[in-house]
Amino acid sequence: MENIITVLVGILLIVFAYLIGVRKKIQLVHSYHYKNVSEDDKPSFCKGVGLGNLIIGIGLVLFPLFVMFFGENAAMCIEVVFMAAGAIAALSTIKKYNGGLF
């Protein structure tokens, strides 16, 4: 059951990644994360935040396969790498274009 929930959350994050990164729906990001982003930088900002969501979403969707092939402990380690990479991508983009996280 938890694998189904994990995959569904991953799919939801991939949908958000598409909406933010491709469709440029900046409203899906909390307003204090983009209040200082200039209009010219908003497409790049959306692309970076969307990429972070995409990385995390892909990791969550693939998690059950990681468990099946590598075991629970190794899968958790792999997932931590996906989560960290996605968070770093999104947060560094926010910091770069917004001047800070808040």
Image: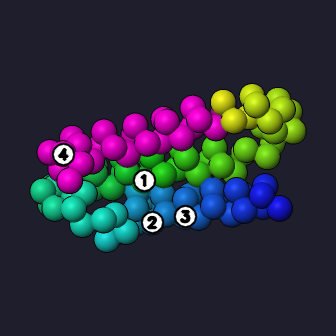
| Secondary element at image label 1 | helix
Image coordinates of residue 100 in percent, x first then y, are 18, 45
Note whether 77 is above or below 43 in the view shown.
Answer: above
Q: Is residue 72 left or right of residue 51?
A: right
Residue name at image x 30 percent, y 65 percent: 30
Q: Which mark is residue 100?
A: 4
Label 1 to label 2: alpha-carbon separation: 8 Å
Depth check: give the residue in front, 36 or 51. 36
Please identify, in this view, whether the residue under mark 4 or under mark 3 is nearer the observer. Answer: 4
| Secondary element at image label 2 | helix
Q: Which mark is residue 28?
A: none
Q: Which residue is mark 2?
A: 19
Q: Which mark is residue 15?
A: 3
Residue name at image x 29 percent, y 43 percent: 93
* Circles 3 and 2 in contact, beta carbons < 8 Å: yes
Specify the amino acid type for callout 3: Val
Residue name at image x 18 percent, y 50 percent: 98
Q: Which residue is mark 1?
A: 50
Give the extent of the magenta segment: 78-102
